[in-house]
Image (tube, rainbow, N blue to C red):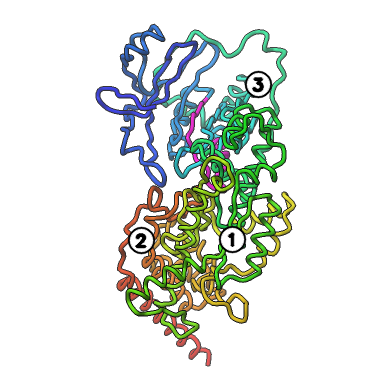
Amino acid sequence: MPIMHRNVRYNCRVIFLNRKILLIRPKMALANEGNYRELRWFTPWSRSRQTEEYFLPRTIQDLTKQETVPFGDAVLSTRDTCIGSEVCEELWTPHSPHVDMGLDGVEIFTNASGSHHVLRKAHARVDLVTTATTKNGGIYLLANQKGCDGDRLYYDGCALIAMNGSIFAQGSQFSLDDVEVLTATLDLEDVRSYRAETSSRNLAASRVSPYPRVKVDFALSCHEDLLEPLSEPVEWKYHSPAEEISLGPACWLWDFLRRSQQAGFFLPLSGGVDSGATACLVYSMCHQVCEAVKHGSQEVLADVRTIVNQTSYTPQDPRELCGRILTTCYMASENSSQETCNRARDLAQQIGSHHIGLNIDPAVKAVLGIFSLVTGKSPAFAAYGGSSWESLALQNVQARVRMVIAYLFAQLSLWSRGAPGRLLVLGSTNVDESLLGYLTKYDCSSADINPIGGISKTDLRAFVQLCMERFQLPALQSILVAPATAELEPLAHRQVSQTDEEDMGVTYAELSVYGRLRKIAKMGPYSMFCRLLYVWKDVCTPRQVADKVKRFFSKYSTNRHKMTTLTPAYHAESYSPDDNRFDLRPFLYNTRWPWQFRCIETQVLQLERRRHQDLDGVD
């Protein structure tokens, strides 16, 4: 919590017992990268192993009957052990406080964390805690926030209790419950004997500077504990990335729905993988809601009844609940195929959503009619002799009309059925398409929230496969095998003539590689070219690698401006191009990249010259 001390704002953890504040521990390492900007609001406490007296506000004094409390970097000394505290980010720093605390005799470490979910991140959390207690011994209690932060992040819980390198209790990683209590019975003598065996640790402990002790007249153990059975180590159970997707974004959707006090979701369902995956996430959310109610969660039950506006309602069947809160809509045009229409209809039927089928051609023709009336010109698709500019504009009109229709139906479709409330519009653009800018600005990807906007196409396909098997949704099989297409250009002999990867000039698998190198490895065009020369040496020539890198950066920089209008999306991937919070970069680039591309070209020519010389030497 934020606390002002000497006119400086600190991010603090307040430790209390029996309505008495024992210690205010200011955070010493602030998170200031990616999604976090703590240095904008707080100052890190820089006085290691020092405390001061903090005068409590009068309202707090009246409650605790204390005038001052210790403020700073200290530990708690009870009658039977010593307890230290880390705060969130401090666990992830190169020299975490638990290192010196453990050397100074602290046996129990606590961490009240605000660590958001990212796919595959649980491994890192568990490794950090087990490594800490393996090297230094001790008991580590990690508690983590649960739920949506009111923004793009979801805190996934995942509490744990570890001792001497082993896990003794694992909390649920995803849950609709607001609070979860985790317990384990451990023996402090196991910590002491573990540490006594390591002479190098004991030598370092003899030289460490001591922490200030705050004495607490309290004990964690008692004589009757002798008969208490001790907890046994457990093996950590990890979710697969597909399982994480089925749980995390679904919980995020539930938080948004109940806190926004809307009546459900509206999803433009195209019959493709992305919108199909989004529909499956809502269906997975319905499964979790039904399970929570089945296990007696009164809070979830109260929220469901508020959402459906029925005080006696109790959800039992996920498909029936989905029909109440999800409206799907297939928006056909003259460029749509019957196959995508059938796929959307079949999936909607199997998950139970209220499904609407409509045709947008009258609206598209009306918009184009205004243009023709004013200019006297009628644009044509490239297939009918039009220019690329004409063709692109005609595609964008269709996409943007769909957005307008989506919001109209989200506001009035329940009213038309005689029910109260409005719907949240769901977007369904994946992280790879956002990175490249393969979307129309203000099309139907412009929505209220996007649960898949931080997930790659590869992971989405794995998630859809999981849903097909776990939820028995055979309609997903045809969605998985169908080529990804926007269906914005004329059909050829009633067959799809446009595919996404052909349009983009790059595969989805390659986009994931580019995204990680650009964001995580901080690489520009030349650095990425040098790295991919080695990575792709068995499948691509230097010239092919150069062409691929140039094509990516040209399209990425041309479309970067679209990132400023991306729908708020669930943050699940470390290479997200989200311009609002995570990936703060310019949106006006020199799209020719003259210096970088010239360096790439020089290097390619040198490599080709060297290869020709090697071949001549063989001859």
Q: Quadrant of residue 41?
A: top left
Marks 2 and 3, the one that precedes in the sequence = 3
Crowding at mark 3 (Cα within 10 Å: few <14, some 14-19, many 20+): some
Query: Residue tagged by mark 3?
Result: 185
* Left or right, residue 532 beside residue 67: right
* Identity of the residue drawn at 48% across and 53% down: 408
Q: Position of residue 590 (x, y in %)?
A: 30, 68
Marks 1 and 3, the one that precedes in the sequence = 3
Q: Position of residue 619 (x, y in %)?
A: 53, 93
Marks 1 and 2, the one that precedes in the sequence = 1
* Left or right, residue 203 beside residue 322: left
**Which kind of residue does numbered mark 3 sit on?**
Thr
Q: What secondary structure is found at the residue carrying circle 1?
A: strand
Q: Which residues are magenta?
A: 109-131
Q: CA distance from mark 2 to mark 3?
A: 55 Å
Q: CA distance from mark 1 to mark 3?
A: 55 Å
Q: Which mark is residue 561?
A: 2
Q: CA distance from mark 1 to mark 2?
A: 29 Å
Crowding at mark 1 (Cα within 10 Å: few <14, some 14-19, many 20+): many
